Every structure is written in C-alpha cells, then in structure tokens.
Amino acid sequence: MSFNIGKLSVTIAGESHAKALSVIIEGIPAGVKIDSFKLRDFMKRRVPGQNKYSTSRNETDIPIILSGIKNGFSTGAPISAMIENSDTRSRDYGERLDVPRPAHADYPASVKFGEYFDFCGGGQFSGRLTAAMCFAGGIAKQLLSEKGIEVCGHIASIHGIRDESYSSEISDVSGKEFPVISDAAGELMKAEIDKARMSGDSVGGCIECAVTGLSPGIGDALYGGLDGELAKAVFAVPAVKGVEFGAGFDVCGMLGSENNDAYYTDGTDIKTVTNNHGGILGGMSSGMPILLRVAMKPTPSIAMKQNSVSLSKHKNVELEIIGRHDPCVVPRAVPCIESMCALVILGKIL
C-alpha cells in the first residue's frame, strides 16, 4: 500500500497478526538529521497497552531500521524499517471468517479475497498498520520542524464531551498522556470511555489538528488542492469517517459576511482576523494556521452481543466478540492524524 505526494513516497506492508510491519520512505534527501529518540517518543504516543483506555495488547513498537539512516543522518537511500508484532493472539478470531463483525472490513474483504484473507485482527485493514504510518510521520514532523513548520493535534471531543478549540490558541499537548488542552474536560472524557468499557461498549470522538508556520501559496487548484490531499491522507487512518476544515459544516448556516475572513496586516505579514477558511483557500495555504477536524467512529469490536450472519450457512446468527480492543481509538489516533498531515505537507514542499 503506497502513499505518493510530490517527490515523497511511503509504502506500508503488513497485517495485524503477521510477523511484522514494514515501511519504506522514498524521497528524503541525504544529510537530514533524524533523532531516533524523538522518533521513538512520538511513536510511543500510539503504543497500545499503556492504560485502561486502550487495548491491553502489549507492543513496544520500537522500529528496526534496515536502511537509509546511518549515524543519525539520512543517506539518500530509501529509508526502510520493520516493526515487529510481538503480542498477537490469533485464537481469538476462530470463527471470524465465517461470521463477519459488524462495522469491520471482514465481509467485503472476504468477498474480495475469499478464504485467503488473513482476518485475524482485521489483517491489512487493521489500525495496527498505523504504527508504520507513525514511523514515517514522525520523521516527516522532524523535517518540517527544522523548517519552522509544526504539526500538532489534540482530542477535540469524545462522545459529546468537548475540549477547548485551537481556534483561540494552538498549544502542543503531545507531552500529556491524555492529549487534551483542558485537563478537566479530559477527566470527563476518561470517565465516559470507562463507562463504555465497563458496559462492553465503545465510544467515538473527534480529533483537531493544526499546521503552523507554512507560508502562503503551497498547494494547487482543483484535484491538487491541499485540503483534498490532506483529506485523502487522513482517510487512510482506520475509523476516520469525516473531515472538515476551519468552520467546516457550520458554514452551511452562515451568511457570506459571517464566513468571509477579513484581511489585515501587522506591518510585516498579511493575515486574516478570523480563520473560518482553515488556512486553505483555492486549494492553497493562506499563511494562516491550517485547522482540520477528523471524526472517528466508535471501535466496532465490542463485548456486547451483536447480530450478524454465517456466510457458509446463509443464516442469521448472534455474534459475541472476544479479544483485546480499545474502548475508544481517539486518544491513540491523535499522532496518526498528525503523521498523515505531516507527510502531505512535507511532500508538497520537498
């Protein structure tokens, strides 16, 4: 599975319960400093098993660099790495090929690949592959930071409980175990996740991501629009069901006079008083922070009994899922959204 934008190419291979994931990044120039400790710290933000709000699957996700980095610098060769799957438990998926899980890719994948599909953990459609995304995204974030471009995200909401918004001030919360601006809102979110977990259910939410420091004019018209490229990229993260920029769907209820962002100058730069356009106009960066929000569905694997079908018998059956699953994917998905945004921006400016 490959992601290409400009001179940048990222190829990811692997399955949830395969021996390992692999990632190849092409287009990184030689001589770029890559801090392995910063990269591991970034990837650790999505590692499972760190608290009761995530799956108990225990993976360290320490990447094994195979090529492209030597003595802390890129060599100009494709950067390749392997991330081992060390805590798989395939026995939990005994009947899953015959009885598809609701809201998972099981049924369409079984039609497409037949008996050869590795359905354990969702196979190649699993959120497990976001570990490889974060390896690539973590490197992209370092390169962007050297150019004064920062990409950061936070949990905007979980099951209707809202955090403060980046529309007022953009702050980096990556150092927090639970990435929210308001710790008080975060505690309410944790309680909501725990409530769903205890009842065998799950909850969804929203992630807000910001890109700052990007100069105006990056992007293209129509099919090459920066907003379109970003939307396509974040939809590669499993569980994403919607993306909006700036005021998003609220523009449907606005007048033009309310939605338009008036220009002004501070004597050096041209800015807008408001940022309803989310930092992108005509598919190009405006110089204002790029602001986007991503809707994440509730984890489809829940402990409650659900209705499904037996594909072999063509009859309705009741399904009870066992195994280890996140009661809410949103907290661990924040670095995944940051990664895909960083890769798009890096691809556009390389």
Image (spheres, rainbow, N blue to C red):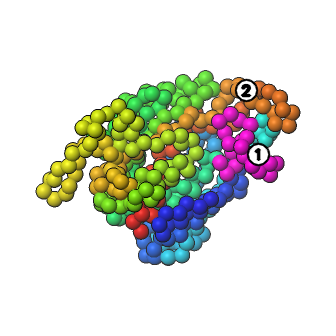
Q: What kind of residue is marked 2? A: Asn
Q: Nearer the viewer, mark 2 or mark 1?
A: 1
Q: Position of residue 28 (x, y in %)?
A: 47, 70
* Residue at image point 59% right, 25% down: 198
Say which residue appears at 53% left-offset and 58% top-offset: 135
Mark number for residue 15?
A: none
Image quadrant holding the N terminus, namely bottom right
The crowd level at tag 1 (other Cα within 10 Å; few <14, some 14-19, many 20+) is few
x, y percent for residue 8: 49, 66
Label 1 secondary element: helix
Quarter of the image for residue 173 reads top left
Residue range (magenta): 100-125
Residue 244 location in percent, x, y? 42, 42
Q: Relative to residue 287, is residue 108 drawn left or right? A: right
Q: Earlier in the sequence, mark 2 or mark 1?
A: 1
The residue labelled by disc 2 is 307
Q: CA distance from mark 2 to mark 1?
A: 19 Å
Residue 123 lies in the magenta-colored region: yes
Q: How many marks?
A: 2
Instruction: Identify the residue shown where x is 81% and y is 33%.
Output: 310
> What residue is disc 1 on?
111
Which is nearer the eye, 70 or 79? 79
Question: Within 10 Å of the Cα at label 2, are there few (<14), some (14-19), or many (20+) other Cα atoms?
Answer: few
- In the image, residue 130 above or below residue 258: below
Vertical side of 111 occupied by 217: above or below? below
- In this orientation, does residue 193 appear? yes
